[in-house]
Image (cartoon, coloured by chain):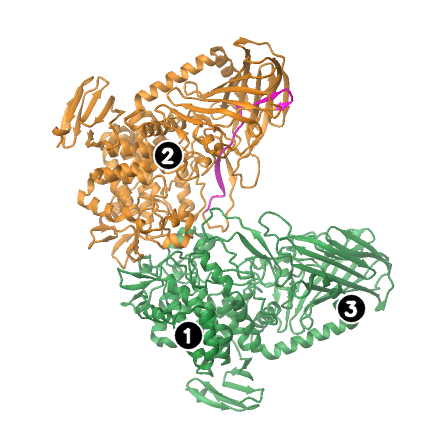
Chain colours: A orange, B green
Amino acid sequence: MKNYIKADEWNIIEEGFDPHLNKISESIFSLGNGRMGQRANFEETYTGETLLGNYVAGVYYPDKTRVGWWKNGYPEYFAKVLNAANWVGIGVKIDDEVLDLATAAVSDFKRVLNMHEGYLERTFTAKLKSGKTVKVKATRFCSIADDEVGAIRYSITPLNFEGTLTLTPFIDGDVKNQDSNYDEKFWDQVTDQISGAEAYIQLRTKKTEFEVCTGSHIQVYQNGQPLAIDTTEVRKEKFVGQTFAVAVKTNEEVTLIKIAANLSSENYPKDALLKETQSVIASAVAKGFDTLLQEQAAAWATKWEESDIVIEGDVAAQQAIRFNIFQLFQTYTGKDDRLNIGPKGFTGEKYGGSTYWDTEAYCVPFYLATAPQEVSKNLLVYRHKQLDKAIENAAKLGFKDGAALYPMVTMNGEECHNEWEITFEEIHRNGAIAFAIYNYIRYTGDESYLADYGLEVLISIARFWKQRVNWSNEKQQYVMLGVTGPNEYENNVNNNWYTNLLATWCMKYATEAAEIVQKQQPEKYNSLVKSLSFDQKEFADWADIIEKMYYPEDKAQGIFLQQDGYLDKEQILVKDLPASERPINQKWSWDRILRSCFIKQADVLQGLYFFEEDYDLETIRRNFDFYEPRTVHESSLSPCVHSILAAKLNDEARAYEFYLRTARLDLDDYNNDTEDGLHITSMAGTWMSVVEGFAGMRVRNGKLQFNPFLPGKWKSFSFTIGFRGATLKINIAENGINIKNNSTVGLEIGIRNQFYQLDGNAEIEVNNAALV
Amino acid sequence: MKNYIKADEWNIIEEGFDPHLNKISESIFSLGNGRMGQRANFEETYTGETLLGNYVAGVYYPDKTRVGWWKNGYPEYFAKVLNAANWVGIGVKIDDEVLDLATAAVSDFKRVLNMHEGYLERTFTAKLKSGKTVKVKATRFCSIADDEVGAIRYSITPLNFEGTLTLTPFIDGDVKNQDSNYDEKFWDQVTDQISGAEAYIQLRTKKTEFEVCTGSHIQVYQNGQPLAIDTTEVRKEKFVGQTFAVAVKTNEEVTLIKIAANLSSENYPKDALLKETQSVIASAVAKGFDTLLQEQAAAWATKWEESDIVIEGDVAAQQAIRFNIFQLFQTYTGKDDRLNIGPKGFTGEKYGGSTYWDTEAYCVPFYLATAPQEVSKNLLVYRHKQLDKAIENAAKLGFKDGAALYPMVTMNGEECHNEWEITFEEIHRNGAIAFAIYNYIRYTGDESYLADYGLEVLISIARFWKQRVNWSNEKQQYVMLGVTGPNEYENNVNNNWYTNLLATWCMKYATEAAEIVQKQQPEKYNSLVKSLSFDQKEFADWADIIEKMYYPEDKAQGIFLQQDGYLDKEQILVKDLPASERPINQKWSWDRILRSCFIKQADVLQGLYFFEEDYDLETIRRNFDFYEPRTVHESSLSPCVHSILAAKLNDEARAYEFYLRTARLDLDDYNNDTEDGLHITSMAGTWMSVVEGFAGMRVRNGKLQFNPFLPGKWKSFSFTIGFRGATLKINIAENGINIKNNSTVGLEIGIRNQFYQLDGNAEIEVNNAALV
């Protein structure tokens, strides 16, 4: 855990340069716009420790797998987020010396991520070996207003000399992935072009043959005045740039504006890419840096209007929650149903792939409430588009008749992961995908989604579960053998309660969904029945499984059992584990972890969170009281579920404590792994802790309900959500809750057990005293 | 399955050259002498498919591991059998053409492995592109009389031309392992020397710094007369040789005798290696090829006297059993307690390592009966020498206080394997190591082994089991969670019956062994107690576990359960599996295999085989009848156990059927994998099927017993065994059993339920009619 980020409501601030923290800061100060993104690598040369990272959404490389022991069914490739052309680079030479913060004496270093307006600013003073000293200020952003464009303003001021400044802005496509399995580079050059202020390079990925054209345009100013420069082309392998010299005097500022664009063959014909990139560059240059930055600020203002959370009385918490929201929107904006939310977003390579069940379980609730309906719908449609691949994937494992198993990790719908206990067994992900459909419809009321997309997915998933269970003669019930639940600290278990529950729930929901579609759109239903070769008898098969499914439980303690045999384990509590043995995933051997009772992340409790309406509070409490002390929360996705359940159980102190575990996970580098990239998807969990936990927001029977409390440390908190056409601002303060309707759509709202009519543009306020 | 090896009682014969079978034949015709060995690669150039393989026992390289997903506790290195300098090479040029069976027209090709005398002979006629035709005869062997020496006699006769024959005998150390993880070569050169007829190269392994000096001496004859030759040195990277030309006439034979030696730094100081190799070469050359070959035949004659099995009425069976015995003795001769029996012996790289539990469970019984007592004792001492490493290995996984976990795969005592469900969980191997001690003492009566070596190992193993079980509050019994049994088609199971049974048996036997040592050698006992910091209270802990261990069983069916939950599986029988779905390890995904009821190899039945005396025949029968139809025998180690149990249950037909599954496993390439090397350890299982199965041989209360039957296809079978100083020849024919005592040691022998006194050099014969 580190603690070097300065608290501020709207800015992430680092003061002073510590090379040991550089890779962490490169992650934290990452920029993105849903279409492209990058780590906060320095523009100028840096020979110290760095992880270079520029990423273009949807562009990946299927790296040939390396495993120790091959298991039948493993995919041969792991689709990786690709480190793409670096367009931020600006070589800086001062007379004969290269500006490099690894070798210069650095002072007044400051990095600021302005989340309100969406840009990164870095300032520093560097004294070179020769004693020559310069002041630098670099501002850059990836535009969310025009998500193919990025821009940099890089200013250098000599403080104690006059001489020659040589600048070499460049685009370098000769990059590689740190996680390349065979040390290969993944890009080939297609073409390049350098002419005057412009430089372009078009690259093609090996195997997948994606093409990306990256272009840049440079303008130079001296003391604010445009400067005519005489550039020399620099062309190397997969590298284009220009170099030029400027005579400088003390205290005279030279500014380089570099406007760049990244266009991919996912959106343009390959042979038009260069021309299209030139045209994008031209219109961005016509606007100019300042206008682009204004548009960026305006676009972010809109996002914040829809999604901000304001916390009063706790600047660190305020900063953290905004950081989480900011990074989520930098990663995914919901414009393109072919994209998804990688666990590291555009901030690192780790985990490859782009899509995990994190999206459905944690991110969908966030986008449902904070972005237009289309955004979360696109996340759902993404899976619908990949249904054929999920059916193929299941077929590879021996399932048939249209059963679908969505992959654990994917880019294009194909499974990427190769770890049998996860790839083949952590199948509850299939349930999360069904649950997200349910959740989306519950939130939006958009039942038409079922006929258009949802039912097909639900039936295919239900078919998988039907084949995945088997009848136990011994138990005279259906069982599900050989699975890994959300708690990955147990593998290949029998009858994971959560997975069994999700399986029958999926079959129930698929049946209900079929009824809805049949009723509402009989023709569509009939055509689906035909295209899916659906046999009505399948309903009866599902019903039989729903009726006769086995769920492990311990009646004496009144708890559900995470899996068969869980109580055979030595029952130790986390509090009794010496600190020196934690985290157990670093301190213990894997077999010891597996046979311990310790739980990595919410498992039974994840089920009680999803389906809380089906259980009375005492049941939830007994299970929470049993599992919580056994949970080590060594996944960043775990604490939010515990926080929400604790809030539900009126355990406000613990709800807040669990919230704290992830709120500043990356800002404080809690797990010593932020240097690999940020934990993007778990950021949605933090949002959930606040909105579903502290504010107790739920949708029940089509109505929003709140069951709020105010964490003791806070003066108040408020957040904005969209719900079925209404935009609401909810404020929870010491005296009670206030809800403002910033739209014309009226709706009924529950607060605790009471319902209130909230008209368009109206406001309700309920004092604590009035809360029942 | 292939069927190209000609049946013959004493020879393995291949007629005709089929390049597609070459790698298989390279395995089958392998040579070895326990100290070194090699695949049957051709002497001359061969540009077709081949797996080059020369191996020196005890010399390995710890290759850096590649795994997909690292688990805490994994070893960083995998010690590999090393492909070493190739000393068989003889380049052959006929005028300007290279002799290469991949490009020549080959006729009259014949390969013969003479098992009786221990050599390989290859003859063929090759017609080159030019039409020039030569006849070649190559004879070679690795001497078991002097196990550092090998020799080749290579004769070429021009059939239709006169011209120049250029020969280039060489030693090539610039070889690599096919299974090198990072495509590295593992050898560096130390020195070389070429002088006249001699050539030497001394190589050093990277990291481990073993050194091996390989030398050769050549002599040339024309028409049987020594020929003075004028050689030119050939020296390349890690390569030494000589080249010379001989003028040849039609039908005049040129013969090259190449005598080679391999000496390793395991046996000599590094700086003396070259000199020692020269001296070994000198004395071998002084003897000459013919004498060396006579010594080889004599040494093999002795081995066959001790170990032969004669089968009358079935040449294929006769050939197969001798092949198995021959390969076992080529792999391990028992002279060196630092060596062990790799699963591929000297016939391939696959599986790396040298030592698996195969040694204790399958090979020890073979060597006990067919070789001097010292041989199997050395196999046991090997583990004793590695006890410290086994304790370290357990410590890495979190065990303490001197608990030992022997590695799954090892060279020097360190774990090599990286597959958590095997490395960390297939811990029953620890029990097999204890059982081998028990088995050795049961067979030899050598109780002194306990005090000298065994007790220390037994206590350390018992300590491991003590820590590996835990008390289940639920069951109020001890349980063992998260293990993989011998049936590797289930992983991370709870309460594997076999493992639980072995665990308590180890604790019982360690206790008994301690009592024996305390009684027989109290001083040694006290000193062991001190050196092991043994606390007498440990006995009580073990006793408590022995008393309160949980064993899964199904009382209704009267069977032991392979593991908790086994009966929840869908119960299908192997006979109902379509042929197209077998072997399931090739046709099914891993998860499907895991949750099926199918068993890879004997598991509960392995336990009933080890501890048959503790169970009545009906219990064994019920379990056999339950598990046998569920066992797919996809490990070559499985059928022998089934064969022995079937024989015990008087199911002669099935005993013979299971025997057949492995008897010719490699000769007929039953599993399409013989090209990787032979299944050396499973060959001991075939021997067991005959001796423990068909002949029903057991040792009970220090006495040999037989319970024989004659497979219907056979006229008779007989075998030789050594037992406590006696050498017995047992013959089982249609009319009954005959036992000849070829020693002066008298003993009492059981046949069925009757005991007979067999004096020195006497004979007993019991007719079937007299058998009760």
Q: Position of residue B177 (x, y in %)?
A: 62, 53
Q: Is residue B123 visible?
A: no
Label 3: chain letter:
B
Residue B133 appears left or right of B268: right
Identified at 44% across, 36% down, the residue is A353
Q: Closest to the observer: B372 or A471?
A: B372
Q: Position of residue B590 (x, y in %)?
A: 43, 51
* Residue type at tag 2: Thr
Residue B273 appears left or right of A115: right
For label 3, the SS is helix
Circle 1 packing at 10 Å, graded few (<14), some (14-19), many (20+), is few
- Mark nearest the camera among 1 and 2 is 2
Q: Report the residue that reaches farthest toward the top.
A: A225
Q: Which corner quadrant of the image does residue A542 belong to?
A: top left
Q: Position of residue B682 (x, y in %)?
A: 52, 66
Label 1: chain letter:
B
| Numbered circles on residues, count | 3
Q: Which residue is mark 2?
A: A681
- Mark nearest the camera among 1 and 3 is 3
Q: Which residues are magenta?
A: A74-97
| Mark linked to residue B282 | 3
Q: Position of residue A207 (x, y in %)?
A: 54, 35
Label 2: chain letter:
A
Have a look at marks 1 and 3 and say if they share a chain: yes
Q: Which residue is mark 1?
A: B651
* Residue type at tag 1: Asp
Q: Earlier in the sequence, mark 1 or mark 3?
A: 3
Relative to A669, residue A396 above or below: below
